Image (tube, rainbow, N blue to C red):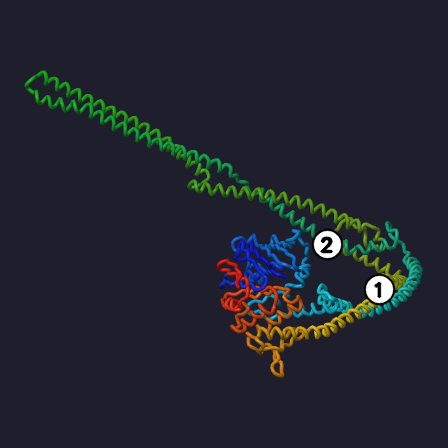
Amino acid sequence: MRLKELRLNDFGKFHNKSILLKDGINLIYGENEAGKSTIHSFIKGMLFGIEKLRGRASREDAYVKFKPWDNPGSYSGSLDLEVEEKQFRILRSFDKNNKNCAVIDLETGRGLDLKPDGFMKFYGGLTEAGYRNTISIEQLKARTEQELVEEVRNYITNLSLSKSNEVDVTKALNFLQDRRKELEAQQLGGRLSALENEIEEGLKLEVKTDGLTLQLKETEEQEKILKKKKDLAGSLELPEGFPTMKAYQTYLEQFPVMKEKYKSYKEVKNQRDLLQEKQSAAQKFLQESEKESGAVIRKQLENLDTLKFEISTQEEKKAILMKDREKELQKDKKRSLLYGMPLIIISIMGFFVYLGKNNFFTGLCAAALLFGLAVYLAFTRRVHRKKINYNQNDSKSEKEISLLKEKVKDILMQFQAEDERTLKKKYEEALRREMEHDHLQKQKKDYIEQMELLNKRISALEQEILEYGSRSLWKFNTEVSEIVSLEDGVMEKLEEAVIQQKQYLARNQELSAGEYENCRIRKEKLRWELLSLEGNEEKLLQNQELYEELKQKKSENDLELEAVKLSIETINNLSVDIHDSFGRKLNTFASDLAGQVTGGKYMDIKIDEKLNVKVGQKDNFVLLDKLSAGTIEQLYFALRIAISDLIYGPGAMPILLDDCFALYDDNRTRAVLEFLTKKRQGQVLLFTCHGREKVILDGFQIKYHYIDLSVAAQKSED
């Protein structure tokens, strides 16, 4: 399988990013955060998909990490690859709401209908676990995981047993293990043993049932004989109205009920009498208390409001009139001065001027003086008359206001109230008394209704008790006469009569009744025992059928369990033998690769069935953990390549190396690159943020494909 072209439509930081890949070495260079790990994860996602995790794991899962920053809805890409010399294109949408995957044959344009488990065959047997543990190596993650052990075991077992890598022997072995546990968990032997005990017990119960049935039949015959004997012993003279002795006994047994009803009769009667007293008290209170109506006070309060409004109106009119009169009087005074005083002043001045000089002007001035005095006196008199009229009107208005105030006093005196607030309090008190009066009337009505119901109840109880006592009980007790009323002491007499009758009947039936009762109890006991055994026969038949079914099933399960155990044992035995054979091949191949990548320092590698690695040193083998970190990384690298080439074929799968040489010195790095370029065929994607790899590859003077993510340049160099 070869990767040809990557198209990161929207993945992580990349948008519409296309990367061409070639066979051989592809050196992908980029500084930190240039997107190398993103491209590496994109390839894995295109091959196997990306699932969104849940819970706490979702914080750091690949789905969230590489979801596009700018356009999260377009989370997709495509991958062109070559499989068995045919060109294909994988199209994937990773968005959880629009997830889909399509595989297209680029030669024919037809789509391949691959089920989820069909991709492994399409990839030449490569699974996600195999990808992660062999061909894909990340920085400081060369160590393999436990699931690779299962991958290798499944692969070598398949090839050895089925000669095909399409059969999942591990899954088959797991199925057999689960089936063995399921068969062992059924515990049919214990169930069969329990059923045998139940069947044996059921057979015993059937024998017991037959014996009880015979006893019951005999007891019923005996009961009939004893019943006739008991009826003859109880053939006494019955009171009228009782057809049988049993009816009369039932009548006697009802006395406790009548006694309770008499008790209820007394209680209800006491309740009625108590209500009667309450009703009488309410009636007396209503008769003694005069219902005070608040309507009269409310009417007088309304009159008070009217009178207050009229007084206020009159006082406002009076104030307005006084103000207007004052203005008018002032105006008349001003007119008297305006028209009279100038003439008087002018005439006096003229009189003095012309006095003794000109008799005509002197006389004219005297006339003007007289006229001015006349005008002034006229206005002054007019003002005086208006004042008199105004005083008369004021007196009339005062009388009207006084009359209204007297009416207010009369209303307050009518209810002996000092002021309007006191009268309102009296009105509220009257309303309260009215409500109390109405409530008492309603309560009185309720008392009457309750008494009517109680009287009906008393009448019904009295009638029922009298009817019970009026039956012909008394012929057996001459001291008790027929009761016609429930007077005191009557129930005691009635109880005494009932007790006497019960004793009388008991004496006459004592002998026969005891024998009959014992027979009846014995019969009921037999019936109860038979009833408890009811269904035993059906359960016995069911258990017998189930026993045969389980017996057959146990036989089949035992055969199947032996077959499953034999199959598991066979597969495990073959797996050990097969692994020993495959292990020798793996050890040889891994040792050869380890020698090449370590420059011949470590040539003897031993790998057990759990992929634990030991390194030969002198005459001994040491665990891999005893070596330096760089050596451990190199040997695990060799182990991955060895397993990949053995399982998938030499150079069949591309190798993805994501900054995995961090712990390598220059010599180790050169040795690994020399192995990948000169001694192993196939495609290699080498991601790095250093220039060391490029310098080494340039020194080999070989062709390789160089991709610089920082400038988006792609070129091949010799």
Residue 147 in view: no
Secondary element at image label 2: helix
- From this view, report whether residue 331 is shown above or below residue 69: above
**Residue 596's mark?**
none
Amino acid at the residue labelled 2: Lys
Q: Quick check: can you spot residue 451? A: yes
In this view, the residue in front, 246 or 659, is: 659
User: Residue 263's mark?
Assistant: 2
Distance from disc 2 to disc 1, alpha carbons, whole Å, reads 69 Å
Residue 228 in the image: above or below residue 398 = below
Residue drawn 53% across the image and 68% down it:
700
Task: Point out residue 95 in the picture as x, y percentages from the top left corner.
Answer: 59, 54
As drawn, is 451 to the left or to the right of 691? right
**Whole-percent x, y for residue 496 in the image:** 80, 58
- In the rendering, which numbered label is found on residue 549? 1
Q: In which quarter of the image is the N terminus?
A: bottom right
